[in-house]
Amino acid sequence: MFETFEVVPAVDVQDGEVVQLVQGERGTGKRYGDPVAAADRWLDAGARTLHLVDLDGAFEGERANADAIGAVVDAVGDDADVQVGGGIRTFADARDLLEVGVDRVILGTAAVENPDLVAEIADVYPDGVLVSLDAKDGEVVVSGWTEGTGLDPAEAAEKYADLGAAGILFTDVDVEGRQTGVRADVVSRVADAVDIPVVASGGVATVEDVVALRDAGAAAAVVGTALYEGNFTLEEAAEALRE
């Protein structure tokens, strides 16, 4: 997983379409069309991993865009890794995805509510689970970023690493979707706490932000709006990382 630093395009799906939300809030989204077309676009641009999220599933607590997500997984095949989150609450949910070509499932709310689920999945699929830690005001939040947990993100990352998580997806909610830049110090605190890969998300607006996340210790950066709006291309990001 992530042998070298990667920029991972986000394909967030709501009502069967690609959507990018601001601060994860319903009604703030801008639509970008068909998920398979988006996936093809990013693969053609050189993406090695795609980040798929069932937004309706994340809000409602059960998968709601299975057909759209499945179509992307089928279209991608072996051309790239696919990690999928949103509405995955049980071992069966995870197994169903991992058995049909998904490389990693992402657990957020389910990992907080039932930490043993992380270990259960990891026992069968050792590289199959990322734990999503979304932090707002220094606290891990769940249920579509609407509920606080009292958990410190760095301490939580250590806990899930011990339970067998293959990596941590860390989202800085305070800057997510705003395209105002990343907070490298917040990311580095989580990355420094664990030996497993940390995938950073939130705030990326420029290629300089991508480089900052790499330098902060992240193994990859999930990027959505900045790519869809053409702030920079995957090729430009790769060039900046080489420099």
Image (cartoon, helix red, strand yellow):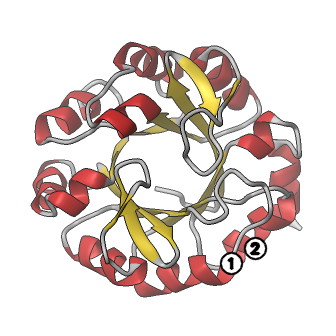
Question: For this view, does 49 lie left or right of residue 31?
Answer: left
Amino acid type at image mark 1: Ala
Residue identified by numbered label 2: 212
Query: Where does residue 169 sit, x and y in percent of width and height?
Result: 46, 60
Amino acid type at image mark 2: Ala
Residue identified by numbered label 1: 184
The local secondary structure at tag 1 comes to helix
Query: Where does residue 198 sit, x and y in percent of width and height?
Result: 49, 68
- Image: 148 above or below 216: above
* Number of marks present in the image shown: 2
- Image: 210 above or below 154: above
Query: Does residue 73 show up?
Result: yes
Question: For this view, does 39 lie left or right of residue 240?
Answer: left
The residue that appears at 78% across and 55% down in the rendered structure is 179
The residue that appears at 20% across and 28% down in the rendered structure is 96
Q: Quadrant of residue 9?
A: top right
Most foreground residue, 123 or 152 = 152
Query: Where does residue 43 sit, x and y in percent of width and height?
Result: 67, 29
Mark 1 and mark 2 in contact (Cβ < 8 Å)?
A: yes
Question: For this view, does 234 lie left or right of residue 86?
Answer: right
Q: Tell us which disc is closer to us: 2 or 1.
A: 1
Q: Quadrant of the C terminus?
A: bottom right
